[in-house]
Amino acid sequence: MAEQWVTTQEAADLLGVRPQTVYSYVSRGILERVGGSRHNGSAFRRGDVLALRDQRRRSRSGVFEVAVETSITDLEPDGSLLFRGRDASELATSTAYERVAELLWQTGELDWAPTELTLEVAEEVTRLSPPDLPYADRARLAVQLAGLRLKADFPTSAVAAINAAVHSLVVAPGGFDSLRSLNQRDRSVAERFANAVGAQPDWAPVINAALVLLADHELATSTVAARSAASTGAGPFDVILAGMHAMAGPKHGGASRAARQLLDRAAESGCATTANTEPAAGFGHLVYRTTDGRADTLLELIKPLAPVEVELADNLALEMRRRHSLVPNVDLALATLERAAGLKAGTGVALFTIARVAGFTAHALEEQGEPMRFRPRASYIGER
């Protein structure tokens, strides 16, 4: 059989990189050019390209991977997480969520003050929603309504989406009157979130840390959804909603809800009894093999304010490690934050959903100028 050759563009598509990167591989001796000319382009052995692709892949337990060059986030199986080269755990304890979002977006400081529009959207969400509507659903509805009212480009639309989503969580009678009476311009997103969900002010730094740690996580499923929408030319609010809706499932952004139930059972029945069940949400990860650094950082920040709740999480983690060789992930930390701060179940899901808007926006901005390339090939197994 004749050896298969591929063009530069085909090699780039197989590797998930740009043609310029393929040329850099040639100049560095990573990939050999075997044909072509200056006029009709280069050619490469398909086998060489596929071998390079497999070599560049990290081993994960997921069954499907998308390889895309990015300069936004770097995460490794050892638990490290970097935002544009800066350690996410260090940022979580030293930097406001707003500044981290601007770092991801590569902008200067933006105006994060809430507007009359975001407050009106939040009020409309309350009018349209039953009182028991989950917080994350309220947040998504707020972004949808904000998109209908505001026509703006990134990142202005992302700031508006975050503000509208945070304000939509206020459900107490008179909540909006009290929200309007506060000097919101001088309050951070974390402080507004804490106020909206009824958390004491002492918890605002912990909430800020959670927002930072969850701002992005490379090509998570929801980010692929948002990036795919961006590649089609979809508008900013549509891109954000694509990511937010992909997060809704219990295997992704909704996992802390099940982790909260697990912690509640552990508090009632004991950690040993609870850990006898099949491993549940809050433990294990598709990427991290040893530890989820986000969980470690968040639990350490919770501990001074609620040592008993962290001890419960630690004891359950010990039993899970003994029985299933699994370590905690960030969903268990979010569930612990809910219990420790006395927050309504599902608050962690909303926090995760709102935080990730920063990452969705960063990836959408990076996707600008790229072709519509998220088109996996299916292997048909049906009847012919």
Image: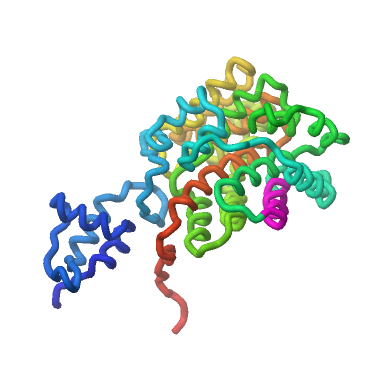
Q: How many marks?
A: 0
Identify the magenta region: 138-150
From the viewer's perspective, tell me whether residue 342 is left or right of residue 155.
right
Locate residue 261: give its quadrant: top right
Q: Is residue 94 magenta?
A: no
From the viewer's perspective, tell me whether residue 202 is left or right of residue 232.
right
Tell me what residue is drawn at x 63 percent, y 38 percent: 351
Tell me what residue is drawn at x 22 percent, y 61 percent: 49
Tell me what residue is drawn at x 41 percent, y 35 percent: 81
Quarter of the figure that contains the N terminus: bottom left
Locate residue 290: give its quadrant: top left
Quarter of the figure that contains the C terminus: bottom left
Locate residue 35: give its quadrant: bottom left
Where is residue 40 drawn, in percent x and y? 19, 73
Dominant secondary structure of the residues highlighted in magenta in the image:
helix
Looking at the picture, tell me which residue is in the foreground, 124 or 220. 124
Where is 245 relative to 232, above or below? above
Tell me what residue is drawn at x 45 percent, y 33 percent: 292
| Colour treatment of the image | rainbow
Kindly give the residue lying farthest to the bottom in the view shown.
Answer: 384
Where is residue 140 drawn, in percent x and y? 68, 50
Where is residue 267 drawn, in percent x and y? 66, 26
Q: Is residue 139 magenta?
A: yes
Where is residue 137 drawn, in percent x and y? 70, 49
Kindly give the residue lying farthest to the right in the view shown.
Answer: 173
Looking at the picture, tell me which residue is in the foreground, 192 or 299. 192
Q: Is residue 283 visible?
A: no
Q: Is residue 350 visible?
A: yes
